[in-house]
């Protein structure tokens, strides 16, 4: 297929848009301000005398700039987004409206506590929901994201070991199928990582795990085991209670990565699985928006053994109202390992999550995990007509396929994903988990209708048949052809990184003083 | 439930295709005992109007800063944000997209990140910047960790003019990496000697501009002393509006600049979410944490952007990654960038001038109050005062008069009696002359 | 000039006198794809057989280059960091990573020769 060319480079509604720096009208601004009072400056000789180099644009030009950029993005609002392990569910606009109430948005973290009792109540409400849903003793509210919550959990674990004279334990066990944040977090906590293999059915090999839990040279080195459950293959770790017992018998702690908590929310309490710590991604399970890469929030629930070491700040009840313990070493925070985030955590994200919890109710949350799992199993069942599932079902909230169905076709998992873009679908997660060859990991979520799933299935089955026909390899390699951009040259981007705009050579004003050579 | 599109007949049809008798059957791998013991004492589903009612009541229990003259800062700042900024970040194509892993259908987010990286590099006076971190405090910890990797040294020196939350978060994170963090005592008068304390064992020295107590200082000599000792200079910025008026850290020799973008990126929201800024020198690129957007071309030769240099990151490097960060603060970074674009050079510098002029106006009046001493000689829009009585009580008394009259230093330093009388006051363009009159009048009463 | 010897991690070493030249194999570069970044060790660095000596990265993968033998690095290939594509173009020639002075030439006996390495790679498929 040949695309018609246009004089402008635009293609109908696909409008090309330069960088703001290329739209510069010097002196222009889209923000008018009242005049400043006439005073003598008190800058102590530190007034900047050089131009910064920021471009000037008018308000209509700025609004059009970002509107055009937005139209180059795929989003949940525009279509099906089955990105495995990312939980791209509908983001209710009620959440946004509530977060913008002046009593939540326009409050300062260091107002007198008597003037923010409603904010503390909101944090406490979110905490109570999370504790009741998980059955856990405490929740650390300040972690900013899933990986930050993992860090919180491991910091609690390390603090507990040190308090108990077990500070020599330096190893964290992580399954091969784990998300990369698990080993990275363990390393940030000063631990070394040992991988435990998966068995043929995609779950932790319990015998291998137990072998790792034996003392080495008479000394127990294992500090914790981190297991994602449901795991990254979309399967529930059936043996998790036995795993927890073995971990505890070895004097170690059981960290459960809650990235996939949305599959089991309101069905069981993770405290009943023997979990010591788990983070909860509010931007997954509780519908707060992903925002093109954050902000999220990763509150971390803790068992009674770990609760004393939780980070500050902690909202606590005081008489008929609330107080905040802001300093480690005092009161309820006397054993706290300290602070890991500024202020009171991701408050605006808490507001959105609470709006969602209240809207869903515990019955709605149970229905949501049920529909999420139903939708995933429906994909697994229908797609098995042409694709090759990596494991026997049933799956939980996501279904994973390997690339056996593409063997000998010359078409790869990547090619299928890129062809799906032309079908108007965001591709599933590719090549993850690493333990599945050429993986396609699909998470439909509960907020998709049967009609949407059927359309996706029909598109993907048709692509699979095309690939197997052996006649369409060139079409696959050339896809996507209908997106705002075709495949981008990532090798070029990485070999000679261009990470910022630079003024054309010879016109060098402003703060930036990077050498021009980086640009080409 | 209004967020769930499946009907009962859909569910039956789908179970038939799957070959399962019920949804519960799909959960058969979950332990039976745990399923049986699960009881939840929680509310059931609520209509939109009920949720709004409950949350609006809760919100109304707070005194919002728009309802009272407000002079709060200490790392979080109330600025006016243009209406078009909030409109843009609420567009679903930005709000409800994921991290831009599929560049062909994520060019909007990627180009916006590239523009953001450029703006952050420009205002800090640095060469490169990343796509953002969680917040300023975590960015500071990441900056110190990066300095430790670059210098292969295991101690850091933190100024008493660094925001106490930045100091605490850094100390917490470094404790687990066995990097010793030497925190100097709080320095409200701005007299501490850092140069005399640098040794060739320090990976970095961490300072802040404007300082936590408001001081503006020239760090050029400090940067030279750091470099002579083989250490790096990390500079924190909690109020980036200042960079519209003051010498940026990059021009004073900073190696790593970290900061908080909230003040330009929308509401304070009780302190979160914010957006961590992170900028450095090009030669340190490989050790920089966080995501990066880079320019390239597509198969038709058209310019485009991709996430690049991801081999530094956790999903490839796993335990050898520069950080475990995965999510950043994309939407708040977009808000920051949109606001910067709306302001432009002219608006940004005028906004900074207005803030400073308003702050000088207040400073000139409060320093004349009996018993009150203005601590910094040079400041931007925030300054510390020493009062003749404990600041916490003064703030409570002002709150009783419906004035949010600053932040007492004792909120951060409860164990330092010498800081009990220190108050931080901030003035921004959101304050009016009437606000300033009201604060000065109320302070006179409360202090008398 | 001696023949090349190979490790199971797909490094090669070629000996001249007491100096070995080390790189990654044709097979390794084909598995990594387009190489975008290379870090070579500085002269004087002491390395152990099997220890980290250099870094090689493609767009989607990062890998350590392990030294096949113990010894002291005499020279890193200074041309590589600016032209990492050389590793794709000529992995067993101009794309060498470093030269090392051998501490114990007997370590070479534990490495594979060309025929053994070819069989080893064939078995990996």
Image: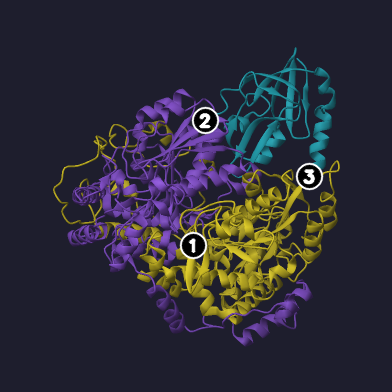
Chain colours: A yellow, B purple, C cyan
Image check: B192 left or right of B319? left
Q: CA distance from mark 2 to mark 1?
A: 35 Å
Q: Which residue is mark 3?
A: C125
- Asked whether A520 or A210 is in front, the reply is A210
Badge 2 element: loop
Vertical order, B201 against B404 (above or below): above
Image x and y of residue B274, in percent: 43, 56
Using the rendered image, report if marks 1 and 3 lie on a common chain.
no
Q: CA distance from mark 2 to mark 3?
A: 50 Å
- Asked whether A302 or A178 is in front, the reply is A302
- Rendered image: mark on residue B202: 2
Image x and y of residue A4, in percent: 41, 57
Asked which quadrant contains residue A259, the reply is: bottom right
Residue displayed at 44% across by 47% down? B416
Badge 1 element: strand
Please state, as top left, top right, bottom left or bottom right, where the C terminus of chain A lies in the image.
top left
The answer to whether one can see residue B35 in this image is: yes
Residue displayed at 27% across by 34% down? A507
Using the rendered image, report if marks 2 and 3 lie on a common chain.
no
Image check: B193 left or right of A237? left
- Asked whether B125 or B412 is in front, the reply is B412
Vertical order, A303 against A214 (above or below): below
Q: So how many labels did they put on this image?
A: 3
Which residue in the rendered view is the most extreme toward the bottom? B9
Mark 1 near mark 3, Cβ–Cβ under 8 Å?
Answer: no
| Chain letter for mark 2 | B
Mark 2 is surrounded, within 10 Å at the Cα level, by few (under 14), some (14 to 19) or many (20 or more) other residues, namely many
Q: Which residue is mark 1?
A: A324
Which residue in the rendered view is the most extreme toward the left? A38
| Chain letter for mark 1 | A
């Amino acid at each position: 297929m040949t695309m018609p060319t246009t004089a402008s480079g635009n293609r109908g509604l696909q409008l090309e848009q330069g960088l703001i720096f290329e739209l510069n009208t010097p002196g222009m601004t889209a923000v008018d301000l009242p005049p400043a009072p006439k005073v003598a400056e008190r800058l102590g000789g530190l007034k900047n005398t050089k131009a910064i180099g920021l471009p000037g644009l008018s308000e209509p030009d700025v609004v059009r700039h970002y509107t055009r950029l937005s139209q180059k993005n795929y989003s949940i609002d525009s279509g099906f987004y089955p990105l495995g392990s990312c939980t791209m569910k509908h983001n209710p606009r009620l959440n946004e409206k509530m977060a913008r109430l002046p009593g939540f948005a326009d409050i300062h973290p260091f107002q007198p506590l008597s003037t923010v009792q409603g904010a503390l109540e909101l944090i406490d409400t979110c905490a109570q929901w999370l504790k009741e849903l998980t059955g856990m003793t405490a929740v650390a509210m300040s972690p900013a994201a899933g990986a930050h919550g993992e860090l919180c959990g491991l910091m609690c674990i390390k603090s507990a070991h040190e308090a108990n004279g077990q500070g020599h334990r330096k190893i964290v066990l992580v399954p091969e199928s784990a998300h990369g944040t698990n080993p990275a977090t363990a390393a940030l906590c000063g631990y070394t990582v040992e991988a435990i293999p998966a068995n043929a059915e995609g779950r932790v090999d319990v015998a291998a795990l137990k072998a790792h839990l034996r003392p080495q040279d008479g000394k127990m080195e294992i500090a914790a085991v981190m297991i994602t459950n449901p795991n990254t293959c979309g399967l529930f770790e059936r043996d998790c209670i036995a795993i927890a017992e073995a971990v505890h018998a070895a004097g170690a702690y059981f960290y459960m990565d809650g990235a996939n908590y949305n599959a089991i929310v309101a069905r069981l309490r993770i405290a009943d699985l023997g979990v010591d710590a788990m983070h909860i991604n509010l931007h997954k399970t509780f519908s707060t928006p992903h925002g093109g890469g954050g902000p999220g929030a990763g509150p971390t629930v803790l068992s009674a053994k770990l609760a004393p070491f939780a980070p500050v700040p902690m909202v606590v009840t005081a008489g008929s109202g609330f107080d905040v313990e802001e300093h480690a070493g005092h009161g309820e925070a006397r054993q706290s390992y300290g602070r890991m985030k500024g202020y009171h955590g991701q408050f605006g994200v808490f507001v959105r999550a609470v709006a969602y919890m209240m809207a869903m109710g515990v019955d709605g949350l149970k229905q949501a995990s049920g529909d999420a799992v139903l939708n995933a199993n429906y994909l697994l069942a229908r797609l098995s007509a042409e694709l090759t599932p990596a494991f026997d079902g049933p799956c939980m909230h996501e279904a994973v396929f390997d690339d056996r169905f593409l063997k000998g076709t010359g078409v790869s998992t990547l090619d299928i994903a890129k062809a799906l873009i032309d079908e108007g679908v965001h591709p599933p997660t590719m090549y993850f988990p690493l333990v599945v060859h050429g993986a396609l990991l699909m998470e439909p979520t509960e907020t998709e209708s049967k009609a949407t799933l059927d359309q996706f299935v029909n598109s993907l089955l048709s692509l699979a048949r095309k690939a197997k026909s052996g006649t369409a390899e060139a079409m696959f390699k050339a896809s996507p052809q209908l997106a705002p951009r075709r495949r981008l040259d990532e090798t070029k981007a990485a070999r000679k990184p261009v990470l910022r705009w630079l003024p054309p050579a010879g016109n060098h004003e402003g703060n930036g003083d990077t050498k021009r050579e980086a640009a080409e | 439930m209004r967020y769930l599109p499946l009907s009962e007949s859909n569910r039956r049809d789908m179970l038939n295709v799957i070959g399962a008798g019920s949804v519960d059957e799909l959960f058969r791998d979950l332990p039976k005992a745990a399923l049986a013991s699960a009881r939840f004492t929680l509310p059931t589903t609520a209509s939109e109007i009920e949720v709004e009612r409950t949350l609006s009541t809760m919100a109304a229990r707070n005194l919002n800063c728009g309802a009272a003259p407000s002079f709060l800062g200490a790392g979080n700042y109330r600025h006016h944000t243009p209406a078009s900024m909030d409109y843009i970040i609420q567009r679903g194509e930005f709000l409800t997209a994921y991290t831009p892993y599929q560049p062909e259908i994520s060019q909007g987010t990627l180009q916006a990140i590239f523009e953001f990286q450029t703006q952050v590099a420009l205002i800090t006076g640095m060469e490169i910047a990343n796509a953002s971190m969680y917040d300023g405090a975590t960015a500071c910890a990441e900056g110190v960790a990066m300095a430790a990797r670059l210098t292969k040294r295991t101690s850091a020196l933190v100024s008493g003019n660094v925001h106490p939350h930045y100091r605490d978060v850094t100390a917490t994170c470094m404790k687990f990496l066995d990097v010793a963090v030497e925190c100097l005592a709080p320095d409200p008068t701005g007299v501490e000697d850092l140069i005399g304390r640098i040794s060739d064992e320090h990976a970095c020295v961490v300072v802040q501009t404007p300082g936590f107590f408001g001081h503006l200082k020239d760090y050029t000599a400090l940067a030279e002393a750091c470099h002579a000792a083989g250490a790096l200079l990390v500079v924190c910025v909690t109020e980036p509006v200042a960079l519209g008026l003051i010498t940026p850290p990059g021009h004073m020799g900073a190696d790593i600049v970290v900061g908080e973008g909230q003040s330009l990126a929308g509401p304070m929201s009780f302190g979160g979410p914010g957006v961590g800024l992170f900028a450095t020198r090009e030669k340190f690129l490989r050790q920089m944490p966080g995501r990066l957007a880079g320019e390239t071309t597509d198969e038709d030769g058209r310019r485009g952007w991709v996430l690049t240099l991801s081999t530094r990151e956790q999903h490839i490097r796993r335990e050898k990654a520069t950080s475990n960060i995965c999510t950043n603060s994309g939407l708040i970074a977009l808000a920051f960038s949109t606001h910067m674009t709306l302001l432009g050079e002219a608006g940004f510098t005028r906004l900074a001038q207005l803030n400073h002029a308003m702050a000088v106006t207040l400073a000139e009046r409060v320093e004349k109050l009996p018993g009150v001493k203005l601590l910094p000689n040079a400041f931007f829009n925030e300054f510390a005062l020493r009062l003749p009585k404990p600041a916490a009580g003064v703030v409570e008394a002002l709150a009783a008069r419906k004035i949010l009259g600053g932040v007492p230093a004792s909120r951060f330093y409860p164990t330092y009696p010498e800081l009990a009388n220190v108050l931080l006051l901030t003035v921004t363009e959101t304050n009016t002359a009437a606000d300033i009159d009201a604060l000065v009048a109320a302070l006179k009463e409360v202090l008398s | 000039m001696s023949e090349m010897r190979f490790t199971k991690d797909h490094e090669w070493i070629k000996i001249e006198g007491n100096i070995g030249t080390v790189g990654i194999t044709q097979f390794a570069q084909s598995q990594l794809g387009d190489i975008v970044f290379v870090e070579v060790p500085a002269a004087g660095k002491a390395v152990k057989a099997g220890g980290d000596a250099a870094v090689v990265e493609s767009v989607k993968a990062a890998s350590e280059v392990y030294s096949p033998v113990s010894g002291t690095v005499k020279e890193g290939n200074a041309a590589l960091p600016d032209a990492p594509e050389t590793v794709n173009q000529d992995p067993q020639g101009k794309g060498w990573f470093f030269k090392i002075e051998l501490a114990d030439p007997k370590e070479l006996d534990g490495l594979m020769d060309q025929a053994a390495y070819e069989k080893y790679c064939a078995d990996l498929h």
